[in-house]
Each structure stands twice: as C-alpha cells, then as structure tokens.
Amino acid sequence: MTVLTDIPEKWLPVVLPIKKKKKAGFGGGKSKKKRTEEERRVKANDREHNEKFQYANNCIVTSKYNILTFLPVNLFEQFQEVANTYFLFLLILQLIPQISSLSWFTTIVPLALVLSITAVKDATDDYFRHKSDNQVNNRQSQVLIRGSLQNEKWMNVKVGDIIKLENNQFVAADLLLLSSTEPHGLCYIETAELDGETNMKVRQSVSVTAELGDPNNLASFDGEVVCEPPNNKLDRFCGTLYWREKKYPLTNQNMLLRGCVLRNTEACYGLVIFAGPDTKLMQNSGRTKFKRTSIDRLMNTLVLWIFGFLVCMGVILAVGNAVWEREVGSLFQSYLPWDPPVDNFMFSAFLSFWSYIIILNTVVPISLYVSVEVIRLGHSYFINWDRQMFCSRCNTAAESRTTTLNEELGQVEYIFSDKTGTLTQNIMTFNKCSINGQTYGEVTDPLGKQPKRLDFTPFNPLANPDFCFYDEKLLESVKVGDLHTHEFFRLLSLCHTVMSEEKSEGELVYKAQSPDEGALVTAARNFGFVFRSRTPGTITTTEMGRTVTYSLLAILDFNNIRKRMSVIVRNPEGRICLYCKGADTVLLERLHPCNQELMSITSDHLNEYGADGLRTLALAYRELSEDEWEAWSESHRCADKATDCREDRLAAAYDKIEQDMKLLGATAIEDKLQEGVPETIALLSLANIKIWVLTGDKQETAVNIGYSCKMLTDDMTEVFIIGGHTVQSVRQELRSARERMMELSRGKTEGMEAWAEACFMGNGMKDGQEGDCTTGRGSKQLHCSSLPPSASGDMDSISGEFALIISGHSLAHALEADMEAEFVSTACACKAVICCRVTPLQKAQVVELIKKHKKAVTLAIGDGANDVSMIKSAHIGVGISGQEGIQAVLASDYSFAQFRFLQRLLLVHGRWSYLRMCRFLCYFFYKNFAFTMVHFWFGFFCGFSAQTVYDQFFITLYNIVYTSLPVLAMGVFDQDVPDHRSLEYPKLYEPGQLNLLFNKKEFFICITQGIYTSVVLFFVPYAVLSDATQSNGVPLADYQTFAVTTATALVIVVSVQIALDTGFWTVFNHMFVWGSVGSYFTIMFALHSQTLFRIFPNQFRFIGSAQNTLLQPVVWLTIALATAVCVVPVLAFRFLKLDLKPQLSDTVRHTQLVRQKRRKPGGRSIGGAWRGTGSVSEGRLGARGGSRRSGYAFSHQEGFGELITSGKNMRLSSLALANFASKHSSSWIETLRRKKTNHTPPSTSGECSPAPSNVSGTCPALSNSSSVLGGSQETPIEEETDAAVVLSSSSHPAASEPAEPRAPAQVAPVDSSTSAAARTDSPGGWARSLETVQEALFGRRGCASASNTQVPPCDATETPPH
Amino acid sequence: MGKTKNKSGPLARRPDNSAFKQQRLPAWSPMLTANTVLPFFYLLAVICMLLGVWLLLLVQSTQEIKLDYTDLGNCNECFDLRRNVSNAAQTCSCRVEFSIDKSLKGDVFFYYGLKNFHQNLRRYMDSRDDGQTLGRIKNLKKNPSSYCAPFDKDNDGVPIAPCGAIANSMFNDSFTLNYHLSSSRSVPVPLLRTGLTWYTDKNVKFRNPRADNLTLAEVFEGTRPPLYWQKPVYSLDPHDPNNNGFINEDLIVWMREAAFPNFKKLYGILNRADPIFEKGLPKGNYTIDISYNFPVQHFQGRKGVVLTTLTWFGGQNHFLPIAYLVTSSLILLAAVVLTVAWWKFGKDGKNMKE
C-alpha cells in the first residue's frame, strides 16, 4: 500500500491534459450516454445491480491516442488547423499537371516538417499522459468484496463498492462516507487538490451507517443511494439513502471527493457513488479555453488580408494571362500549343490563376506558424530558466505552462490580483505591542545590524521555537513580573476561540480559525502564558510555569458589528474578570474615563502601528463583582433564550457588560506581505499597469493590505467606497464618485503645476527622512491631495490619484448589464481598485468586464482555487506556486513562487518577448514579400505563364533553410536594452501596451518595404543582365543566370536586413546569419553540381549555373547595386527616426552605448519615472497612518464562542468550522442564484450586513459628515463598512482643519453623538443594520444542517427522516 | 516529487547559471549613430561614383552594330514567304548590307537576336528532356519525358530527338558575313562557331548517346527530328562532325532559355587568325547572307543580328554605370540631408540632458 504523500505532482498530469482535450477525450462517449442520466441509483455491495446502469468505472483515460490510432487521429487533428489544410490544398493543386507551377516537394517538404514536429510533440505529451494515467489507475485501494477487504487497483473500483481509506490516503473516487474510526462517524479531509483550501474539513457520516463500524457489518450493508447525476459542483451534493425502509438525506457533508486526502483519521469506509470521469474532480477539470494572444489575432487578420492580396494578385495575373494568351499566346501556338484541356484563353487564365496561387503562396509561408511557435517555446524556456525568478525558499522555479502567450506578457494593462497568498503570505506575526503606555518590539537598528532573535526556550519550555521576537525589554518585563504585562498576556491566552491539541506533553498545536488569533495566542504562549486546553466550561493555561484553570463563564463572541470579543472567566481565586480585545475604534470608547491619558498614549502607538501597515487590536479588561456578574448573567440568559431578535438582544446584553473597561494595551500583528510586493506594485504602476485587487477578504483587511502594499497611498486625492446594496444605491455611488472626480479634475486648473511642484518638492524633501512624518505630513497631504488632475474633465483624462473600493454585493449590481459601462468608466479612472468580498465567479466577471470594455490585455494572478475562474478568464493567468494547493497553478499559464517575480515576468520577459515577436513578424512578412513579389513582376515578362523566377529548390529551401535561422535567432535572443534597464525604466513597457511595435501600420510598412525590395530585386538584374555578357561573349540574359542572380541578391539583401534588425548580436546570431549565407552558397553549389544532375537530369537542370553566374563580376556588381538600393533608404529612415524621434529604448540604449555612468536619471520620461519611484518609495517610508489602523481582521465568522460553550468537543467544533467554511464558499453560488431570481441584496455572509436606510443616503451630505467625523480621509473606512461612503479628501473644507485632535477624533465616529445632519438617523440605522445582520445570520444558521446553535451536543448533524 | 533528479537540497531545481540560460550571452549591440551612418553614406556614395565612372568609361569604349533584318531589303520576300507555314520546306535566302564607320577593335562577337519570342513561358521551359539530351538511350528511343508533349513523339509514335517545344522551335537561320574590301572583292568573315556555350553545357549537360563504334546517324536511328527541323540532329553542322548531335553548339545555345522575350544569342566569334581581321573588323562595307528559315510573323516578332566588341561585362550595357552614378548621387543627397538633419534637429543622445 503506497502512502501517497507526494501529492500535487501526481495529480498534475491528470488534470493537465484536459487543456487540450477535445470532446473525444475521456468522457466523450460516455457523456453522451450520461446525458440521459437523470438520477443515479447506487446499491451498496451489489455489483450486478449497479452494472445495469453502466456507470463509468474508476479508470481515467486522459490520453488521446494509442499506437494504432496515433497516426490517423493525429493527422486528422492537425489537418483541422486551417493553415495545414490550406497547404494540403496547395499540395493537391500542385499535383494537377496543368496547374502545377512548382514541384510537389516545394510544399510537401515544409508541410511534412511541420506535421512531424507537431506529431512528435503530441506524441510526447500523450506518452506522459499515458504514464500518469497508468500511475493513477494502478494505485491500490482496499475494496470490500464479499465481506473481505481486498487490494484492488483504482481502475477496477466500481460504483457501489465499499472501500476503505487510511490516513493520508487519496480518496479514490467520490465516496459516501459510511463510517470512520473517529467518534460520531467524523473524518477529516484536506481538499487542497480540489479547491486549494488547506485547512482541514470535517465530513460526517449519516449516523445509522456510522454505527456499522467494521467490515463485517459493512459487508451486509445494502442501502441504496439515489442522488443527482454527476456534476461539477464541488460544494453541493444532494441525495437520499434508502436503507431498511427508511430515508436519510445526504448532503455534501457526507461526501468524500476524489482528490481529497484523508487526514487525522485512522481509517474510514465509503461507498463509491461517482467513479472515474464522473467524479467531481474530473468533472471540474473541464477543458480550458485555448488562449490566443492579440498578436495571434492580429496575425490571423493579417494572414487573411494577405490571402485577399494573394487572390488579387492571382486575379491580376490571370487577367494578364487572358489578355496575353489572346494577343500573343494564340500566335505563339505553333511553338507552344495549349495543353490538351485548354481550348481558349479564358480557361488558360483560369489555370494560370491557380498556378499563381501556388507560386505566390509563399507570402504566407507555412514556416511562419512553426517559427512563431519555436520562438515562443524559446521564450518559455528562458522564463523557466530564469534564476531571478527562482524561489530558493520553496525550491520553485518559474514555470511557463503555456508556450503560446509570451508576447502578450509585454502588453499587459490590467493586473487582477488575489490578496491572500498572493500579495500576502497569509502568515500573521506578532510584531509589536503596547502595554500600559510602553511600546515594545521597536528594535529596528537603522545601521542594519540584525537584531538578535529572542530565545524563549530557557525561560519557557513550552515556547514555540518558530516564534520570532526581537525586543528583550518585553521579556524582561515579563520576567520581573510587571502586573500589566502579565495581565496583557493573560488576556491573550484566555480571550480567543483557539483550539489546542496536545499530542504529547508540551507539544502544543493550536488550531485557530484565523491566523491573527493564532499569532496572538502563540505570542502569549512564548511569553509564558501558555494556553493548554479548553473544555466547554474551563480554560487551562500554564502561567509562568504554573498550571491555572479558569472557569469560563461566557464568551461574548465576535461579530462584524461588534468588532470585538470578550470572555468572562473566573480565576481559581474566584475573581471574575472580563477580558476584551477588539478594534480600537470600538474599544477605546468603552473604557473607563480614568483611562484618558493612557488612551491617548496607546492611541499614538496604534497610529504608529497602523502607519507601518500592521493590524492592530486594543486590549482591555474589567473586573466584575459577583453581583454584577449574576445580574448580567441573568439578562444574558434571558436574551439567549429569546426566540425573536435573539441576536439583537444578545448584542445589547454584551454591550451592557463591555463598559468601563481598563485599557491594557494594544497589539500589532503583521500580515506579512510577500517579499517585494510594494516595490513590485510601484514599479508596475509606473509601467502604466493598473492593478486591481480582488479578494474574498473583508474590506478592512483588503484596505489595510492596499495601504501596506502601496496600492493606496495617502497621496491619493480620494478613495471612494462603494458599498451599496441596491442597484440604485450602487449606481448613485458610482455616479457621485465620478462626478467628484470630474469636479476635482475641473476644479483647479490654474496653479496646477505649482501644486505639482510643491508636491514633488515635498516628497523630495521628505525622501529619506521617514521619521519625520508628523509635521510634514499634514502639509504634504494638503498639497498633493488637492493636486488637480488634468482639466478636461473627460473620464479618460482624469489623472488624479483616485482609488475605488467596492464590496462584493455592490459588485454584483455593478456587473449587471446596464451598470457595466458605468462601473468600468468609474473604476478605470481610478488608479487602484480593490474589490473585497468577491466570489470566485465575480472575480472572473470583473476580468471579463475589462476584457470586454477595454480591449486591454489582462493578467490575473492568484494562488487559490477561488482564483481559478479569474485565471482562466484573463488573457494571462498566473498562479503562485510553492504554496499548498495547486489548483491555481494548474489553471494558470505561468506560475512562480512569489508575487514580485511578476515584475520580471512582465517588464523583462514579457517586454522582450513582445519586442522579439514584433520584430520577428515584421521581418518575416518583409522577407516573404520581397521573395514572392518578384514572381509577380516576372509575370509581366513571361506571358503570365506562372513561371517562377527561382530554382524550385531555392523556393523550397528559402523559408526553411536560408532565412529561417537568423530571424529565429533574432526572435529568440534579441534584446534592445538589458534586463536591469527595463526594470529601471518601467516606461519602456509602454510600447507594448499601446501596441506600437506591430500593428497594421507597421505591417503595411513591412510589406511596402518588401514590395520595394522585390521591385529592386527584379528590375535591377533585369536591366543589367539583359544586355550583359560574359567576357567570352556568352549572354547573361539566360533564365538560369537571372534566377541565380536574383536569388543571391535576395539572400544577401534579406541577410543585410536581418543584420540591421538584429540589435543584439550573440554568438548565435553571428553563427546563423553568416551560416545562412554560407549555407546558401554551399547548397546552391551542391544542387548545381554535376553529380546530382547526372542522377536526376530533369530535376537538377541548373547544373553549372552557380559557377557560371557567380564567377562573373557583373553579377556581383548587380547584386551590390541591388543591395545598396534596397538597404540605403531603410538605413536613412532608421537613422532619421532615431535621430529626430528617438524612442525611450533607443535613448536608454544610447546611454548604454556611450557608457555614460548613470549619474542622474535624465530624460523627461525617465525623470518622471524616477521621480515617481521616489515618491512612491517615499510614500512607503513616510507613510502616515492612524487612519487605517484597527484592522480588526481576525475571524471572519462569528459563532465560534457559542460552539465552545455549547460543549461540543474539539473535533465537533472543527466540524462547525468546516461548516462555516463550506457555507462561506457556497455563498457566492447563493449570490448568483439570488441575482438570477432577481432578489434584492444577498445577505448571506456575515459581512454583507446591509442597512438599506443607510445606503440610500449616499449623498454628498453623508460624505460630508463622514469626513467631518473622520478628520482625515481613510478614517471612516473601517467604521463605515456597510454604509456607502464617499470619502472626501482633505481638500474638503471640513478636513482642512488639521487642528482637530487626531486620535480621539478617530475614535469618535461610531459615537452616535455626532452632530452631522446625515447621521441623525444613525442610531436607528445602526440598530436596524444590526438587526438585519442578525436576522441574516440567524436565518442562515437555521437552514444549515449542522447545528451550531443551541442544540445540545448530541447528534446535531442528523435530521432523521420521518 | 515528480521528477527526481540526482541533485537534492533546496536549490535542486534552481536553473543553471549559464550565460545562455540567463540571457546574458556576450553580445555586440550595434546602434545607428551619426558617427557610423554618415561616414558610411559618404563612403558608399564615393564608391558608387567611382564604380559608375569607371564602368561608363569602359562602356564608351565598346562598339556595337545592330541590324534588324526581319524585313530589311530583300529579306522582305523571305518574310512574306515564311508567313505561310505551308512554304516551310522552301528555302529562302536574302542579303543584308551594312557598313562599319569605325573599325571594331579586338574580339568581335556575332549575335542573333529575337524580339517578342517567349522562351520563358512555363510550359515552354518545361518542355524538354534533359535526360534525353544527356544521352540516355531510354529517353531517346523509348519514352522521352512526358513534359515534351506534344513534341515527344510524332504522329507515328516514333520518339522525337531532341524532344520538346524548345528544341522544336530552334532558331535555324544561318548567316554568312562578307567583308567587301572593294566594290568587287569580298571575303567571307571567318566566324568561330564553337566556344559559344558554357563549359558545363557542352561537356556535362549535353552528351550524345554512347556510340560504340556506331555513327551518330545510326545512334539516332529510330528517332525523328523535331517537326520544324529541316535537318536531323546528327547533321546539324555539315562542316564539323564533332559539332553534331546533342552537343551541337547552336542547339545548346538555343536550349539555354532566355529569361526575357527580347534576347540575343551568340552565333559566332570573329576568327582573328586571318590577317585582315587580326585587329577586329576593319571599317568598310559588309553584307550578311541569310538563310531565312525562322518565321517570326506568327508571334509578331523581330529578328536581327548584333555585331559588338565587349568589355569584361558585356557590350554596350549603359544601365549598370548609369545606375551606379544615379545611386551614388542619391546616396550623396541622402547623406547631405541626414547630415543637415542631424546637425540641426538631431537629438542624438542630446535629449538625455533635457
């Protein structure tokens, strides 16, 4: 029995091949059959019965061919490609002797080459697919057959079998969980393969089967499952189990899906419901759309045009032939009668048309497509090989998983990024804290000396060795027994909902619902306050080595409105204490008035932490007397038992007790950004790439991250928040945001430059002095935020720094058909857009929206399964690899380990790819026009008889030998500026976005140049040779000499041209350019040799032409003349362009060339870019905070506390956790459904707690009031999560009073005592919103099968049939 | 994991640090700068100028006499005679007179020229069998290449040698050039009728079938001459038995198809062994006796003769020198414009300082 611990790789090939899957794939035939399957009936342990239905077995076939079918099937597939068919058609044409103007091999050689290269590639792919199929299909599993467990290969597992799974095994098929070794028939699975979520999930069997237990009982189990047919919904299952005359409903909770891994469970038994291709995993790995780049599309258009052009030329020449045959040819009949079928000139012209189509087809050579593929493959390898995109920590190199999109990387305009795991590492670290007015954790040595990491082990044997903290003072303070410090950590060790698991003594594992909480409890653990275990009524800790058991009286749980949680505990001494932690905004106003001084100090600290992008929490406690407790406890019980408005009442009860607390301090948790994220974002936005963050996270978190990764800065003119719950309100909000933008744009036209200057100067001055933000900040902000953008007021020209934050439920409205345009125009005018609380589907919709409205290249980057849809729908999908979960990577086109590699991928690789591809295409079209059009001119001299100018071998080899390698070398190796330069000057990226290097205009220039060259190449030799002779008198005007001269001139001219085009002469370029010219002469001499002629006299007629022609000086004079005439104009134009209108890249290159050490960045654009960078980095360093602190971001879902108190064991509560998770993930489907049925706002998730009355008030008045309240722009973000607020900047009159004491003012907003008119309804609105939320929650909870409510701990998950 | 390499450790999958893989190959990145482009232009202009002048001088030193005899003088009668195909068997000869004012010094080459004769038609050019003319018995006596059709076999199914449209339409006028020392005395100008072809054509491409003690006539037994020919291929040259069969130089010259409808082909070279013609063709009066066989009126063609002296690159070929001179001046013009542009408006790196 192989224990499959090395998961992802093995699945990878299984899911991968679907990419190219045609319908003929694994499910092809079956799916047709299955289409009629309306429900599935599976009887356990009854293979005969189940066979009647012919369900798919568990064998997975992803390969396309076997040895016999390979050739026919592969050829069939290949000829489905238009290009290949076209060339086949040409080949057939050539077989008609009356038409054939070229030998058959001129087409068949390239075609065969192309076909065989593709075939080899396909064969290799399929071989690996076979291998992976075999490997997967031959895995062993234990199947219960006739009462005994037998080892069986996966592929032999049938629907209806009962199989046994052991810990860490892969689930072989979609199973109905029957029983497990764990209590209550629970088992734990990891679904990373399915949805990328790495937390464990709980599945529970139906209780009747859970009792079955051992194989003997199971063997006699003969229940029948009736369920829905196979589908791809991972989070839904609907079925019924009929057993012993009873019905039991089945849900997704009872299912183990293929691809999951069993964890923490010794063994379990399951009944196979779906097998092989029917499993949800396979159903989900549907065929991805084949992505094409914009260059591809352009190329296809151009190729069509060229075909049109080809037909035109054919028609012209055919008409010419008709005329000629009538006027001249008919008279020439005695020397050359028409071919037998030809009886008049019209028919001759008709044939001539096709003959010319054959000859001139080289304007679209078959090698174009192959060469493009080769170049892309090369670029992909360069990406794979790039050491600077290798993450040594996770040992992952960048991988280009598609080889067809590289050049589009150079054209990206929009990046859609996931947050968690992409921008952030999703690791929370306890970074700083403030205890009783003393701040700890600030040990950043400016000299860069690495501070020593504290070693906790001697002090505390239970410490977690992974925990990092650098400030010794804190440890000292703990050691000396500072009361506040002790209380601080005691709070952290008690006030949470973390579960602990202690497998062996001292080996604690915390299972926290959110990483924030985990970080806090771990910090407490390391500082000597170790949370050991909990029961429903107690919490056991080890405080400074002493085991203490607190009795847990109540958990006042977190929710989004409360933004805080508390516990009430009784310590062994009998003292009752309430510990509370929460967002500072809510907490600070609940403190006892005597805390004023401490509060302001702590507030300052919180500001500092917030400025550093840390997530802060304030901690407070309150001692309760027995009476108080009794009284409150009574009211609490009362509220708890209430049937109506329970949530409301509870909240009110909680509110009552959480008063007059004493402040303990504050914590700061760092949501660790991935390395280099702010820099990357800054660089990318300098490259004019717009970055949108689409996250499932809640708004505060998203905004916080937005700030810490510098998407949002305090320099921004205004940050708009769209949070409406109805169509009207969203529309209104979008409109007012836009109006505001216009207003600001229009507002200050004059003095703009002055402002800008001041702003820049401010930045410049502040550059480097990060500490000094308090004084400089205010003025700077004042200046910069009132910096008016361009004056026109047109949406496109709004250049102010705006940001838009929109939440998922508003987005749902914004994405509706009639709102789309509005949303796009508003959002695209903003510099940064953050969409929070979005569902995976919405992510994809947003991407589609931009694709549809903006015609811009989009890139989506993400790491989780929830990003898959967006990754698939964007032009380019990038997956973050190296983390757990490979769904995103599997769906992606590129994958690498860290977000920061994106800058290299785009600015270096993408840019180069685009440049190379463009240069390649330009040159390729040029050379083929130059080559082919010569035939056209010759047509006028040869009676339009479709005589070629060149030797047929030359025609065959021109594209595949003589000119292919130099241009390939250029396409693969060319660089205009070195990689570090393109990172230094992000503006260099712009040509790609504007599509400047290869577009229709460039194309016409190329073909014009090609046609010009062909004219020169035909007429110069024509004019020279028709009168020239050898020195012995033999005329040079014979056809063969002419052919050789023209061909040689052509090869030389195109070689000179490629030499001009090549900007980066590596050894390969030299080799290929010189080699091609050399090979031309070598091959020509060989083909014109006696030996070949003697063997095939009729094929090698050009015997001796090479030597007879090329020994003539006049021929060389002709070639030289032609070359000069072709190249000189090009050279002159290029020089002029370079001289008069240099591109940025030229300039950069020039400086490079002149070897000027870059003293200061020069050049306007460069200067701008640099100044830009400066300001951004300044923004990072001197970021002012305060406003965005209190990222009370832990626990997305409430209700955990109740679970604990309700007495379920640890496992059961993690079941609930899973329940939440699944609900959470299902919410987007819910939203969708609601949207479809035209319901009003979705209120599924806790975050979506709308207060319609509030929303409707989205008017300037509200914005006013909030800015008054906030005192600075971002303040209200946290407070006003629900209400739609148009945040006004400091340009607003109210905000221009910096005198307003900052910290207290920020605490104020929730306070209903504000005077603003718009807030008069505040309390009511508040209450109502609270109500709505709670109703929503309540309702949902009621529906959810797994009860986490009041129901006692027994089999809550079961609802037996009646 | 999936691929197990021998290497292990955290950097096992790190790409190699080779210049190639990291795209850091040493490379030369040239750039068009004023320092390179402008001198290049001037240099090129000068070179072209010098070449042009030199070539022009060379061309000026050549002399050429062209004579279109299609219906000149008494050839008119033959012209009319040939108008009718039924008269193809009748011989016709005519005489054309001309004078040379300035003696042609050195080697003098005698060409015949045709106008509007399309040797470059695709099917015409294909209509030959190089296997046959290489002397392959199979192609000769059994099956000439199908490309020769309809000139591969005659109506009786006997193969034609040499087959094909090209051979069939061979130019068959013959010329005798006479120099009139005085009004009464004339001497024939001796023309070398060999050495008119490429070496490879004469010695490799065209071979008579292996004779094995047979006469050429016997070798070609069982074949027919092309329809329009008056003589069989083995007796094309009555004067030189080694110039018969497929290696007959007139045939070879004809079989080397011209690229354009107006062309000239070498007929003979002045034999300067005779003391009179030691220095070329002296000035005076000349006549050409033409055996007028080749009809041109079908295709509205003209035919003529050309007498010329040569430089190493041909006769009076004015195009090349003039093209060079024109190119040179254009390059010079471009160079001046570029210089001015660079001088006045150029931002050659200067914008870096803006």
Image: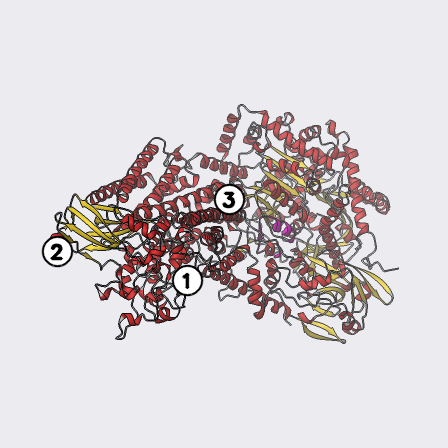
Q: Which residue is mark 1?
A: B149
Q: Quadrant of residue A1102?
A: bottom left
Amino acid carrying mark 2 in the image: Asp
Residue A148, percent from left and from top: 74, 76
Mark 1 neighbour density, 10 Å: few (under 14) some (14–19) many (20 or more): many
Give the letter of the chain under mark 1: B
Callout in the foreground (2, 3): 2
Residue A881 is covered by the magenta coloring? yes
Q: Which residue is mark 2?
A: B274
Q: Quadrant of residue A234?
A: bottom right
Region of the chain picked out in magenta, as a range: A865-887
Q: Is residue A470 above or below residue A1107?
A: above
Secondary structure of the residue carrying tag 2 is: loop
Residue A544, percent from left and from top: 66, 53
Residue at the location (22% across, 59% down)? B195
Asked whether the residues under marks 2 and 1 belong to the same chain, the reply is yes
Depth check, front residue: A1060 or A956: A956
Residue A353, percent from left and from top: 48, 51
Q: Which residue is mark 3?
A: A445
